[in-house]
Image (spheres, rainbow, N blue to C red):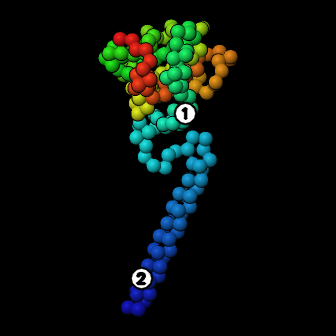
Amino acid sequence: MSRTTGETAVGKRAILRDLAAFLLLCVISLVVGLVINVFRSNPLPLRYQTPAERAMTFRGSERCHPENPIRAISPRALQTLMGRTDVVILDARAEDVYQKGHIPGAIGLSRERFETDLEKALPKLMAQTTRTLVVYCSNDGCEDGPGVAQSLVEMGFDSTRTSTAAGGARVRLLKGGWDAWVEARLPVER
């Protein structure tokens, strides 16, 4: 019987040794993964982010989307650009909301009907004179504006240049969206 007890003790030690090795391997893998993530150009978030958090990360800063740093433009700055032929304003809100009121001259390019609306807007977006595309939605918490802006960037429009000397339109987001525009008592078209 003592031999069986000895074999059992050896077996338990082997299991504990294997378990400890497994846990050590897990910890080392976790540490290596975290270190690699830190040095990635686009690190994975370490906590869950809602779609709104992923789409809008700039409350107060000049960047709007973590993967593509789309710059924001203030309502007053946009007002100074209005009427210029090289600026196109795009309303990313739903069609029924757009019909109730929008920034003068804005083209409806809703996220819900992006492909359909894009067909109508494409000639204006691709015009040789177009240098700046300003996208807006309801407010900073709305994810439609950044979603449409991101889609435009993925189509090849530029989000990073501060100048348009190299050609091609740059994409900007209206900081504060429609709510900030109305709050600033700027012109509205119905």
- State which quadrant residue 100 falls in: top left
Cα–Cα gap, marks 2 and 1: 63 Å
Q: Which residue is mark 2?
A: 8
| Looking at the image, residue 142 lies above or below residue 13 | above
Question: Do the residues bearing badges 2 and 1 touch, measured as CB atoms within 8 Å?
Answer: no
Q: Is residue 13 left or right of residue 96?
A: right
Q: Which sits earlier in the primary sequence, circle 2 or circle 1?
A: 2
Q: Position of residue 98 (x, y in %)?
A: 36, 16
Instruction: Say whether residue 22 is visible.
Output: yes
Question: Considering depth in this image, is 55 or 6 the residue closer to the camera?
Answer: 55
- State which quadrant residue 49 falls in: top left
Which residue of the protein is positioned furthest toward the right in this rendering? 165
| Looking at the image, residue 56 lies above or below residue 3 | above
Q: Label for residue 63?
A: 1
- Few, some or many residues within 10 Å of mark 1 (<14, 14–19, 20+): some
Amino acid at dot 2: Thr
Q: Position of residue 24 (x, y in %)?
A: 53, 66
Amino acid at dot 1: Arg
Q: Position of residue 90 (x, y in %)?
A: 46, 17
| Secondary structure category for the residue under label 2 | helix
- The quarter of the picture where the C terminus appears is top left
Residue occupying the point 61% across, 16% down:
168
- The quarter of the picture where the N terminus appears is bottom left
Residue occupying the point 40% across, 22% down:
182
Residue occupying the point 52% across, 19% down:
78
| Secondary structure category for the residue under label 1 | loop
| Looking at the image, residue 90 lies above or below residue 41 | above
Q: Position of residue 2 (x, y in %)?
A: 41, 92
Count of numbered tags = 2
Instruction: Say whether residue 143 is visible.
Output: no
